[in-house]
């Protein structure tokens, strides 16, 4: 019992130190709780204090926001020096909240991007454009929707600059890279940070699940291929931030989903059978949300 308490004290002390320094590294397992992935050696675990980004200005600012009716996550990322920011998957009903946060923190919101044309809520991008001069909207060119920026595979959404780790005297753009991940819809994209530490997967990959494939050009085989080729090929420690969660979970990792996702660990044939037999009810707002989202959320609002 004493040994467990001592390990907990050591882990807490080390975590507090990491949050104070914003440092990320491999540490001996006995310093932490000894948690590891199956592919990590017994003597090491990875500690990555992502929460420090929200408070200490170490690297890009990051904040996860939640809209409770549709269980939608909105994500704010910003460069702490230039103050340029990007908003992912804004919701109409929480535009006021998002604008207040951006204003309070002194950010310049450059782009509001949707990971796809949503069926369960109306996007806030249109209202944001009306209230923030110069802000641009973005969505996949395959979505069928209109926006200022039509995204394709490999495109970069830049916001500010950061110091290069290999050359501290130089700076390079801070950006999100677009990976096309169709299957839930034709226009689904996953947005990956330049260092591949975070992936914003929309409805393509959820925590221990995935988006449905029974409407809006949905295709189970394409979704399976998208996840395995474009998301599961990211580093295992890459954090997964989905557009929705219905069980109170906030994030996962690529490594976790590769091991534990109950659908996407199956064969493609098994996956197709699972998706075919979900028998989910029609989204309550689909008849309103999809037409509105095709025109940047400005349809009869």
Image (cartoon, rainbow, N blue to C red):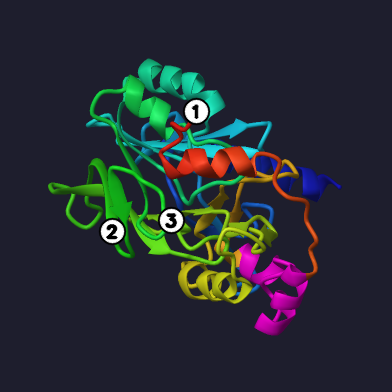
Instruction: Please say whether residue 262 is one of the residues in the magenta stretch.
Output: yes
Q: Position of residue 75 (x, y in %)?
A: 48, 38
Q: Which residue sits furthest right?
A: 1
Numbered badge on residue 143: 3
Mark sitting on residue 155: 2
Left/right of residue 153 with respect to residue 93 in the rendered view: left
x%, y% of residue 139? 38, 49
* Residue indicated by mark 1: 300
Q: Are marks 3 and 1 in contact (CB under 8 Å)?
A: no
Q: Secondary structure at mark 1?
A: loop
Counting residues from the start of the chain, the first of labels 1 and 2 encountered is 2
> Which callout, 1 or 2, points to the residue nearer the camera?
1
Q: Is residue 141 above or below residue 124?
A: below
Q: Reading the chain from its start, which is encountered first: label 3 or label 2?
A: 3
- The disc placed on residue 115 is none
Q: Main secondary structure of the magenta part?
A: helix
Q: Give the magenta-colored segment's residue range.
A: 256-276
Could one spot residue 73 in this view of the protein?
A: yes
Specify the quadrant of the image occupied by residue 106: top left
Residue at 53% x, 54% y: name it: 239
Dot 3: few (<14), some (14–19), or many (≥20) neighbours within 10 Å?
many
Total labels: the figure holds 3
Crowd around label 2: few <14 · some 14–19 · many ≥20 (10 Å): some
Closest to the observer: 291 or 241?
291
Give the mark nearer the N terminus: 3 vs 1.
3
């Amino acid at each position: 019992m004493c040994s467990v308490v001592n390990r907990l004290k050591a882990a807490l002390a080390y975590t507090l130190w990491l949050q104070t320094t914003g440092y990320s590294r491999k540490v001996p397992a006995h310093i932490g709780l000894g948690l590891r992935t199956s592919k990590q050696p017994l003597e090491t675990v990875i500690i990555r204090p992502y929460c420090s980004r929200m408070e200490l200005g170490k690297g890009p600012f990051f904040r996860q926001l939640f809209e409770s009716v549709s269980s939608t996550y909105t994500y704010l990322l910003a460069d702490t020096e230039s103050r340029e920011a990007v908003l992912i998957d804004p919701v109409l009903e929480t535009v006021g909240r998002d604008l207040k946060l951006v204003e309070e923190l002194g950010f310049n919101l450059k782009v509001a991007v949707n990971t796809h044309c949503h069926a369960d809520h109306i996007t806030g991008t249109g209202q944001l454009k009306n209230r923030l001069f110069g802000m641009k909207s973005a969505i996949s060119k395959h979505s069928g929707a209109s926006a200022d920026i039509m995204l394709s595979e490999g495109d970069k959404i830049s916001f500010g600059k950061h110091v290069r780790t290999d050359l501290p005297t130089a700076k390079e753009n801070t950006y999100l890279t677009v990976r096309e991940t169709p299957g839930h819809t034709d226009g689904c994209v996953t947005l990956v940070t330049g260092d591949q530490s975070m992936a914003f997967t929309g409805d393509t990959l959820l925590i221990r699940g995935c988006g449905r494939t029974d409407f809006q050009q949905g295709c189970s085989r394409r979704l399976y291929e998208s996840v395995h080729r474009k998301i599961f090929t990211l580093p295992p420690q890459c954090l997964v931030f989905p557009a929705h969660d219905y069980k109170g979970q906030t994030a996962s990792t690529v490594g976790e989903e590769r091991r534990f996702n109950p659908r996407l660990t199956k064969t493609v044939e098994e996956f197709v059978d699972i998706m075919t037999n979900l028998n989910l009810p029609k989204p309550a707002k689909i008849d309103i949300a999809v037409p509105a989202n095709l025109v940047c959320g400005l349809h009869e609002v």
